[in-house]
Amino acid sequence: MIASACLRDACTRTVCIVRLACACLLVGGGLAVLSGCASEVPTSYGTGVSIELAQARADAIANVHYELTFSIPSDRLELVRGSAVVTFILTRAGSVVFDFAQGPDHVLSVRSNGGDVEYVVEDEHITVADVPAGQASVEIEFFSGDQSLNRQADFMYTLFVPDRARFAFPVFDQPNIKARYALELEIPSDWRAVANGPRLSREMEGERATVLFGETAPISSYLFSFAVGRFEVVEQERDGRTFAMYHRETDQESVQRNAQDILALHHDAVAWMEDYTGIPYPFKKFEFVAMPSFQYGGMEHPGAILYRSEALFLDPTATQNMELGRASLIAHETAHQWFGDLVTMEWFTDVWMKETFANFFAAKIVNPAFPDIDHDLRFLLAHYPAAYGVDRTAGSNPIRQPLLNLNEAGTLYGAIIYEKAPIVVRQLERLIGEEALRDGLREYLSTYAYANADWADLVTILNGQSDDDLVAWSRVWVEESGRPRIRSTLSTEEGLVTQLVLEQEDPAGNGRLWNQRFDVYLGYQASSPYTTSAHLRGPRVEVPAARGRAVPDYVLVNGAGVAYGSMRLDERSKTFLLESLEDIEEPLLRAVSWLSLWDAVLEGELQATRFLQLVERVLPIESVEQNVALVLGYLETTYWKYLSVLDRAQLAADLEEMLWQGVVASESVSERAAYFRAYRGIASTEAAVERLYAVWQGDDVVPGLTLTERDLTTLALELAVRSVDGAADIVRTQLDRIENVDRRAEFEFIMNAVSEVPSDRDEFFARLADESNRERETWVLRGLQYLHHPIRAQQAERYLPESLELLEEIQRTGDIFFPERWLGTTLSGHQTESAATIVQDYMAAHPELPGRLRLKVLQAADSLFRAQRVVN
Ligand SMILES: [Zn+2]
């Protein structure tokens, strides 16, 4: 909302007042004034939901109620028609800006306080002029756009996160204008309806039904949702609360097998959250919908959670990990009812908070029920490698990032939010203690119930619970990027430790200090490790408990998998791990050792060839599948990115043999498949390539693995990129083998990227300049992966300059993850100095590149730049 004056400092940007002479001058120029001549009507805040608009509205608008009506035709090609009566208190007279990302043809009428009113439909907004201060009411009739309605033949559902409610109806589409929503849905009479509020009535009239939902508690616009269609429902009362599951599963056996578990998991998660937070379930009812092919695992709409059906209904053959995944998903969405729904971030800059805490609670709720799974190892491998993968680069970003417009909220997502933030919250719990964190969270949730709060609000509360300066702690962990370099130094005398010192250093040279508590392990070949806790808050700390202990064979600062940083191994520890890593009994300690050794490779402190010798010796006796997967990943990356061509040729045969033995000896199908993928990935010798060809031909088999059509397709592409004899025939034959039309179209799209003929590859690349040829992003990426395969890297260098030049256009036209993936895949196969120079030249020639995009380039180019130092 804006009144008739400049807002804060915003007037220099996009907000100013113009006097419109007459509406008719402007109609047709993209701006339509639909009600006579306007007097003082603001020009636009621009498209999307800018922070200026959001702040101005949050200051001037309160106590919002929506009465929404949607009429949903059974024919999904017919428009959805709706009306909104929005009542609110306006603290200053003036214009009121609604978000509605449709053109004037979708706005049927606008009235204010029961009478005609001047309004403008422009730049994804409806601006209503001259609304008096006080209690206000605006009524708008409209056609919804379909962009966020997910309409299918006999069902549909809304998915409005982060700013997509505005595609469907006029709304103040920002998280910190919470509102109560009453809803009326007119639907085909054989459909059911689910929404946030309680169901009040259902009336039938011929082939149509009208369902009324009572007002919700105050919720943010991205959490408002409804789903309608042909659904079955399973209801059950537990502890006085009714849980209802809507679904479209036709396999009755599957419903019978799963329904009880699904309902019980929800009940248990609610009970746990009530107990932990001390706050009863905050919404009026608990319903959820299992939606086929839903975009995410789940979305936490209060009272109407949506799930991907496939994640809830498990097959009888589901592994324990899949059961754990389902339980975690249910606990995550249930935890959001308190963290995210009851208390919501002020602005999407803090979206990481709700995701991280939902995961944090989910782990506490679920893990005890799965005692056979090594949860610490799972946490380590799920979070650390990915977080380090970004945080060690010059392009790293902080957990909490500024956001100027909600239409850019997509660029916030990435490994730092998903992988580093959970590590940091676990650090926080260790720093202040479990009880203090729980008490702080209770206070936070009750203080800001049905309202909004940001990270600073939580830190202020927690600061009262802790001796540490959490504001300083937060500044470095949450508001800044990067990680400390941590080193241990051992002094010894006559076989005993006289001093163990830990030091941290800011790799950026800015003197930052990362305050953290963790466990240090002193490891011994002949006996169990000795563990002691350390609190590293300054640049240096001594670990007194180590004094007088027998000199260890190795020291692991991150022994418990809790500390975060680049852990520099001292020479003694490094030597021990290289010689005897396999003697370490605890799987978590082995994983931590691998992480540290990998850092040593990337820092140029351990030769890649030496690292691979260790892999070759230790991998065959690694018994834990999670660790096998980690090391196989390191192996492939090292092989292609950090070995010279000469070293690769020397090591290939032995590594291939080791991997094939892994295929043969693996006890589980998933581990066998992982070994085979790695074998296929690095296959370089004539013998290995011939074996792959024989497998593809059907003349040979992979022991214990049944290859699918997809596997054979990949094999054909891998053979082609290796320019085997008859490569073109292999590709053509494979094309004929593919019966599924979608997969055939994908293969045809990719074929040229693996061709031996350079002009075919040029043609593949040239087509990508046209936006319409980039619509199927996964196809593009798969083709690029082969175009820039390390084997072809030299010839592919000529595509690099134009690929980089396309980047900004790709950000404008592609989905949110595409720019990052475009860059990553393009650079993935390159390791030469000339390729690195192309990237540096591009950066130098484009000083105007937007900040977050520049960081993405630096992230993607990290391994290319690093290869210049590591490969020798
Ligand atoms: Zn979530």
Image (cartoon, rainbow, N blue to C red):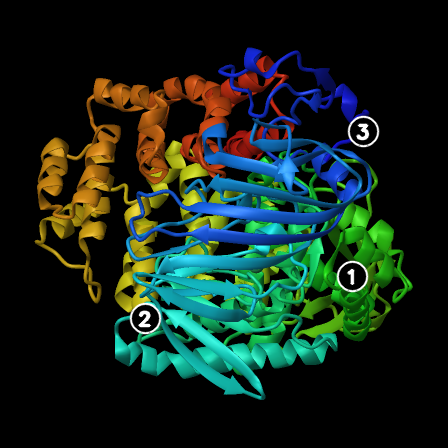
| Residue 537 placement, left or right of 810 | right
Q: Is residue 233 above or below residue 762?
A: below
Q: Amino acid at mark 2?
A: Ser
| Element type where label 2 sits in the image | loop
Indicate which quadrant contains ligand 1: bottom right
Q: Quadrant of residue 713?
A: top left
Rounded to the nearest whole Å, what is the CA distance between mark 3 and mark 2? 64 Å
268, 67: nearer the viewer = 67
Q: Nearer the viewer, mark 1 or mark 3?
A: 3
| Residue 717 placement, left or right of 471 | left
Q: Which part of the image, by quadrant, shows the N terminus?
A: top right
| Residue that badge 2 annotates | 668
Q: Nearer the viewer, mark 2 or mark 1?
A: 1
Closer to the chain start, of discs 2 and 1, is 1
Q: Amino acid at mark 3?
A: Leu
| Residue that badge 3 annotates | 7
| Element type where label 3 sits in the image | loop
Q: Is residue 251 visible?
A: yes
Q: Badge 1: few (under 14), some or many (20 or more) residues near its Cα, within 10 Å?
A: some
350, 598: nearer the viewer = 350
Q: Quick check: is the Cβ at mark 3 less than 8 Å away from ligand 1?
A: no
| Residue 409 placement, left or right of 444 | left
Q: Residue at x 19, y 56 (%)?
A: 708
Rounded to the nearest whole Å, what is the CA distance between mark 2 and mark 1? 49 Å
Q: Is residue 320 above or below residue 651?
A: below
Q: Quadrant of residue 578?
A: bottom right
| Residue that badge 1 annotates | 448
